Amino acid sequence: MKGHEAAVASGFSRRALLGGAAAVATGVIAGSGTAFSAPGARGIVPELWHEFVREPYRHPQIPFVGRAGFGGGAARLPRRPVVADVRDFGAVADGRTDCAPAINRALAAAGAAGGGTVRIPPGVFRVDGLIRLGHSHVVLRGAGSERTTLHATRNLTELIGPYGSRYGGDKSSWSWAGGLIWLAPEARWNSLTEAIRARTWPFEGWTGNRREEWRTLTRTAAARAGDWTVTVTDPAGLRPGALVLLRLSDDTGHTLLRHMAGDGPGPDAYTWTDKSKLLSYVPYEWPVRITRVRGHQVTLERPLPLDLRPEWEPQFTTHVPELTGSGVEGLTLEAVEAPQRPHLLDLGYNGVVLQCAYDCWVDDVTVRNTDNGFGLVAASACTLRRTRVSGRGSHHPYFCREGSHDNLVEDFTIEERTTPAPAGTQLHGINVEGLSSYNVWSRGDMRTGTFDSHRGMPFANVRTDITVNNDGRHGGDASAGPLFGARFTHWNIRVTNGRAGLMKIDGLAPCSATVGINEVREFDQIDVPDFEGDLHSRLELYGTTDVVRPANLYEAQRAAQVKRSGR
């Protein structure tokens, strides 16, 4: 599908993109009347935006992310009918009763009923165990983050056990995975507990550690990144609405990894073979829903993230049954205020984590005094909206890893920590790693933290319309490979303390775009590019007192879709 045909099928046209940009410039999303932070009529439209309008799905520096998030970027989240109240299962807001069993019973009952909302009324509910949401179309809803609080008294080390890293040493896996509110399909939870008992890696993605968890549905023909339609050899096992997994394996020359890095002399000269942690993320697995099957032509709900080449054995496969249509809303999860532990020794006072989830969401949720705030682990097409991290300080306020794709984190806040950081701890901020791609962080207020590209070569991600007091540090093991793959974009970033550190990325990220950022200066964590030679990266509106227009890259892409489709 090419040109005008592709634009019509996806709900876009060049006129719609230009109209969407105008709507965003005036601070209103077309078709919704929703206002947001934008410069109004003043500002400068960068050349990169004009280029993107001409080629929205295959621009060499800017990825198309207009369909990131739940429901392809749906403005409204579902409102499922209430089918259970936690009080009917024994929950009491008295500060003494452990309400975790009652909440889990209510969630299980909603799942057995085929879905619906589990209500938590206003008040403070003590929880001594983790909250498991493992059934699709189930929503856990409080009365609002200012009214309903879950007071968590124990950590994941106490609840599940100490769990070391698959990379050796004394590192705790609870430093980057697992949540006290944990959204994951039952099949994945079962394999998680089995893996912990067997002392193997429990945080696998869509096809896990065992070959029997997936099978090939059909092979695909060659295609280009940005195509919406692919040709398959056997469409018999495919149907509209089904979620399939696009699986790409690398070859001995690591041409898939080189493609993710933008191809060319730099990636060709890079040493890939010794990056053991990076190689553990391959094959690349990208979940996507099918929208149409016509003969051997299959249309997808999002354009292809990468080329499909025969040497990578492109195929659609089965996967662990996804968690879909579920969410957490309107509550605060407050952990006991235990001191933050040294780096990578976290006990697991973690917040909300989505694992193997697709089209799920978190809305109006605050986490306080957590080791890690909100996490995406092999999660895709999910929306985190109006979320907040507060309290004594977190290792990862937000993490996005193990091949998480097409997620949207918007209207998020990381508050200043309430206690000084203990010696030996680290603060990363908004993390992305492990070949995660096409994720968006939009309209953020980061009063502490940083933009943490945590190696593992994340690519084609966007951070836009964010104010950040850049006082954190990025992380990442050397065996995890490059900080950035290709087509990473920072668009309209306001660094209040003027510190660099992965803000201005034109000298680090291949085929990237840095647009609209105030002047920044280096500090003691100075990175060198992973790839030699010309990075083919772009820098526009650096250090200017004017503002970039459109102010929000995601909203400009999304507004064009709203204008075209009326969604």
Image (cartoon, rainbow, N blue to C red):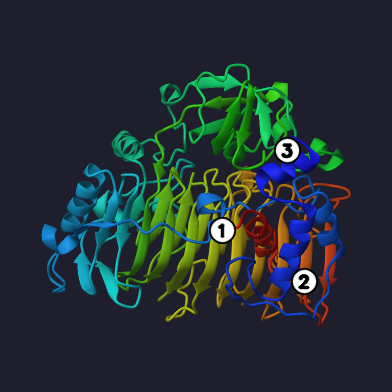
| Mark 2 touches mark 1? (CB < 8 Å) | no
Image coordinates of residue 302 in percent, x first then y, are 62, 43
Residue 317 badge: none
If you read the primary sequence from the N terminus, does the residue marked by circle 2 or circle 3 appear first? 3
Front residue of 269/320: it is 320
Badge 3 marks a residue whose secondary structure is: loop
Q: 520 above or below 133?
A: below
If you read the primary sequence from the N terminus, does the residue marked by circle 2 or circle 1 appear first? 1
Badge 2 marks a residue whose secondary structure is: loop
Q: Looking at the picture, which amino acid does disc 1 mark?
A: Asn
Q: Looking at the picture, which amino acid does disc 2 mark?
A: Arg
Q: Point out the frontmost of discs 1 and 3.
A: 3
Q: Quadrant of the N terminus?
A: top right
Q: Which residue is mark 1?
A: 431
Question: How far separated are the C-alphas under marks 1 and 3?
Answer: 25 Å
In-image side of 425 versus 227 (left or right)? left
Q: 393 above or below 556?
A: below
Q: Which residue is mark 3?
A: 225
Counting other residues with Cα less than 10 Å from the Cα at mark 3, is it few (<14), some (14-19), or many (20 or more)? few
Which residue is found at the position 83% from the left and 69% from the top?
45
Residue 474 shows in the view:
no
Which residue is found at the position 50% from the left and 28% from the top?
239
Counting other residues with Cα less than 10 Å from the Cα at mark 1, is it few (<14), some (14-19), or many (20 or more)? many
Q: Point out the frontmost of discs 2 and 1.
A: 2
If you read the primary sequence from the N terminus, does the residue marked by circle 1 or circle 3 appear first? 3
Based on the displayed image, in which of its 4 quarters is residue 552 positioned?
bottom right
Q: Which residue is mark 2?
A: 549
Badge 1 marks a residue whose secondary structure is: strand
Q: 317 above or below 177?
A: above
Q: Quadrant of the C terminus?
A: bottom right
